[in-house]
Amino acid sequence: MWLGPAPKRPFNWNRFGVGDRWSTFRYFWDYAGGMMTDWGVHLIDIVLWAMNEKAPKSAMAAGGKFYLRDNRETPDTLQVSYQFDNFVLTFGTQSCNDRGIDGQGYGIEFYGSGGSLFVDRGGYKVMPQEGGRFDRKKMPDDVPMKFNSRDSGNDAHAQNFLHAVKTRELPVSDIEIGHRSTSICLLGNMAYRTSERLEWDAEKEIVKNSKRANELLSYEYRSPWKLPEA
């Protein structure tokens, strides 16, 4: 019963995922998609918001389980590149090194012709383009601008949700927005698992050039679970 509609498996602590091991279920394709669908949804969502985009045209990925020696199925190292009409989005994760972008544990960096913008949940930093390079020494002392360390932004989301319930307005982070961000992460994992450059039809939500990838879009539920009739 704990496994839900996923295939029946022998008991394993990593698959169980409770207590101090609450996140280990993400190691397995039966239940999740590793760091791509864990952190990827949060970060890619911000990129789509900033760039006013809904979906990429294609995706390709490279990675593997290079260092960790456990029973996880998802990669410990992954790089995914998404092609949009006017830019390229690259998502990267490495489970065995937490340096991240510019020494930050995680975050997003936008590269433009006039400069770069780094963003995380704590604040942001703007780095102007000067003579073909970035001179960080000239940045003001008050950069990056930090939010209240006790405020992760969740309080504002909760308030907005309650406002939406009362007014019947859409919340600022509507379910369709979350769906799009999630779909892009799933596409990245599909590109990794098939080792193919996948062309994405965002309207139909299918891969245009890979039958194998489309087979990963759904799976048979284990009885007694089933989807309701349409």
Image (cartoon, rainbow, N blue to C red):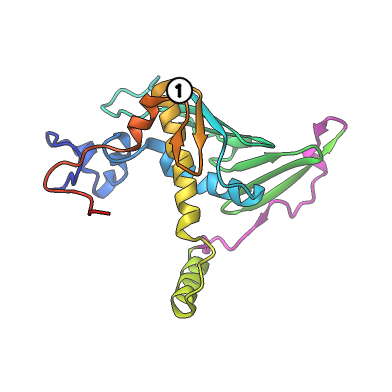
- Residue 80 makes an appearance in the image: no
Q: Position of residue 169 (x, y in %)?
A: 51, 73
Q: Position of residue 30 (x, y in %)?
A: 26, 36
Residue 205 higher or lower than 70, as above or below: below
Query: With 146 as the anchor, is 169 left or right in this view?
Result: left
- Bin the neighbour count of mark 1 within 10 Å (Cα to Cα): few under 14, some 14-19, many 20 and up: some
Work out whether residue 73 or residue 102 is closer to the camera in this orientation and state it. 73
Query: With 194 as the anchor, is 93 left or right in this view?
Result: right
Residue located at (36% from left, 25% from top): 212
**Residue lying at the far bottom of the rendered structure:** 166
Q: Is residue 150 magenta?
A: yes
> Magenta stretch?
131-153
Residue located at (19% from left, 44% from top): 5
Is the C terminus in the top left, top right, bottom left or bottom right quadrant? bottom left
User: Magenta span: helix, strand or loop, mainly?
Assistant: loop
Query: With 9 as the anchor, is 138 left or right in this view?
Result: right
Per the image, the residue denoted by label 1 is: 63
Q: Quadrant of residue 15?
A: top left
Work out whether residue 148 or residue 128 is closer to the camera in this orientation and state it. 128
Type of the residue with mark 1: Gly
